[in-house]
Amino acid sequence: MNKNKWIVLILVLVISGFFSFVAFADAKLVFEDKRLNINEAERDDFSNRAIAEGEAYIITGPFAELEETNTVYGIPTGSKSTYYYLVSNTDYESFAKAVESDTDNIFGEMTWYVASVSDKDMVKKFDKSAERFERWMQNYTNLWSLFEQSGYDPELDAQKIEDILDQIPTESIKVSGLLRTQSSNSKYEKYRDQFLESGDLGLSDVGELMLDVDKEGAKSGNIEMIIFFAAAAVFVIALIILIISIVKTIKKKKSQELY
């Protein structure tokens, strides 16, 4: 084997080994079936890497839209537009109970997390859900202003209150994805912090890791598994070829020494 072939073989071995190593962390989540039910999660649950799945019901934003470089474990593969939303962990049933309980703070027991969405179809769904909930919240806020009006009559306005409660949005979006570290992009951090402040929230109220939302119907971890097994297979094959080449080279040298 000539020098160039040795160099190529070693490079293939190093690169495939690198991809096997970095992809294993995500593939391991699939091996261990480490899954997080978003709708039962607490804030601390968003501090550990996991496959997350559940329903996105209360969605606000997007608070940022960034054109970003799409990478596969650090290797640039193109560009993408990513939209960031603030989402609560609650579902329709839990939220409806909170509203009907007539509490002053219907968001008090909720956990919030950031969802990053790049798939166009999912972006449309997130936008539609956010707009729908925003309209309802405006009506709900107007409803509470009735209690502050001097002419408020509980009997006359009872139907208005019932109508608002009946209009609570019921639609949710089934989501899944991997919990990843939030972007360190300075623009992202600026937009996120401003958005949180506008809603009287701080970083301490939001999960540490964000949900990188998959395409609808996609199985979380599949791509990571494919990358891991493909890289591992290439690594093993390259290693075997390298070992065989080394053995052949040693035998050849010994054979030459005998003559």
Image (tube, grey):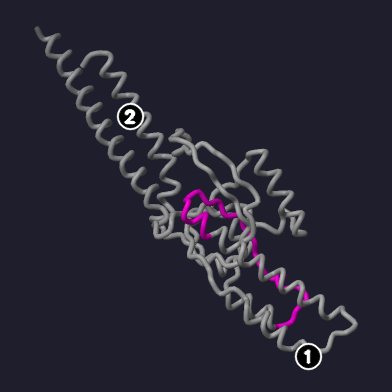
Q: Tell me which label, 1 or 2, sits earlier in the chain.
A: 2
Disc 1/disc 2 C-alpha distance (Å): 78 Å
Which quarter of the image is occupied by the N terminus?
top left
Marker disc for residue 53: none
Q: Residue at x 60, y 70 (%)?
A: 90
Residue type at mark 2 is Leu
For the residue pair 259 and 171, the one nearer the viewer reads as 171
Residue 82, position in %: x, y? 55, 46
Q: Residue at x 69, y 69 (%)?
A: 137
Q: Residues within 10 Å of mark 1 (few under 14, many from 20)?
A: few
| The stretch drawn in magenta includes residue 113 | yes
- 27 in relation to 43, above or below: above
Question: Residue placed farthest to the right in the image?
Answer: 150
- 156 in relation to 35, above or below: below
Q: Residue at x 42, y 55 (%)?
A: 220
Residue type at mark 1 is Leu
Q: Quadrant of residue 243?
A: top left
Helix, strand or loop at mark 1: helix
Question: Residue placed farthest to the top in the image?
Answer: 259
Foreground label between 1 and 2: 1
Helix, strand or loop at mark 2: helix
Q: Residues within 10 Å of mark 2 (few under 14, many from 20)?
A: many
For the residue pair 20 and 84, the one nearer the viewer reads as 84
Marker disc for residue 156: 1
Q: Which residues are magenta?
A: 101-125
Residue 102, position in %: x, y? 74, 82
Check disc 2 and report the residue beneath it. Answer: 13
Q: Residue at x 42, y 51 (%)?
A: 28
- 230 in relation to 120, above or below: above
Q: Is residue 39 left or right of residue 78?
A: right
Question: Residue placed farthest to the bottom in the image?
Answer: 155
